Amino acid sequence: MTEQLRYSRHFLLTQWNEDRQQQLAEKKVLLVGLGGVGSAAAPYLVSSGLGYLTLVDFDQVSLSNLPRQLLYQDADLGLDKVQVAQQKLQLLNPACSLQSWSEQVTAESLGCRLAEFDLVLDCTDNLDSRQQLQAACYQQQKPLLSAAAVRLEGQISYFPVSASSPCYCCYSSTLTQQEFSCLDQGVLSPLVGVIGSLTALEAIKILAGLGSELAGKLWCFDALFSQWQQLQIAKKPHCPVCAVSL
């Protein structure tokens, strides 16, 4: 009865039912990056009924985080983001099993640890970390949902497990680290909330079996003009990640 009441607005949807809610409750997600996008996506994942969420970040809460990372307050300054986030998210939904890793991930450090997860969420602001995540996901055959926000621009893309689909590195090989750095380029605070909440929406649809229209595509948002654009990502024949046979 408690679960019925908690998720009653979900059950009013014609596209939703108890089976989808139960399916979501059985899924395990690895969320890497608890900055603006990650800290906006995580509360919706937990409150919507995700069963298991592992949080990954190596950073501490700083004063410049507070305008856009609403999981944190002044009292949290200097504390590890993963510890603060885990405590606050657990209050949102005690039924969600939460874990945290305070570390900077690499393809090597992830290794076989990806095996237990159904979906990986890349919410980092570091190009090298994004490419490392994609390499690990492709090697372990795990779907990757990637999101970013910088300046007045946001983007979301989804890379399912498919030998015929492009990977993140097919798209990112022409990018530079500065293009993803809020430290260098800045970002308007509400933008990360827009991208974070849409990332959570796509993740929930994927995990509950509703699917995603973003497979192999890049969904771009221009916040200045409030315009969306969807681009097809081309699979590169010589990509260092997905052109290699598993």
Image (cartoon, rainbow, N blue to C red):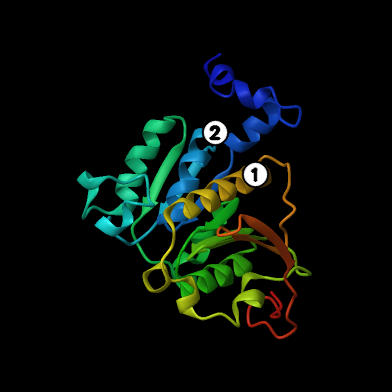
The numbered disc on residue 49 is 2
Q: Secondary structure at mark 2?
A: loop
Please report the residue visible at 46 percent of the width from the left and 30 percent of the height from the top. 95
Give left or right: position of 166 versus 203: right
Which tag, 2 or 1, sits closer to the chain's start? 2
The x and y percentages for residue 235 are 74, 76
Label 1 packing within 10 angstroms: few (<14), some (14-19), many (20+) = many
Q: Quadrant of residue 201?
A: top right
Cα–Cα span, label 2 and label 1: 11 Å
Q: Residue furthest right?
A: 164
Residue occupying the point 27% across, 45% down = 73
- Where 141 sits versus 67, above or below? below
Q: Which residue is mark 1?
A: 207
Q: What numbered label is drawn on residue 143? A: none
Residue 7 spot, x, y in % from top left: 58, 24
Closest to the observer: 148 or 107?
148
Amino acid, disc 2:
Gly
Q: Quadrant of the C terminus?
A: bottom right
Q: Amino acid at mark 1?
A: Leu
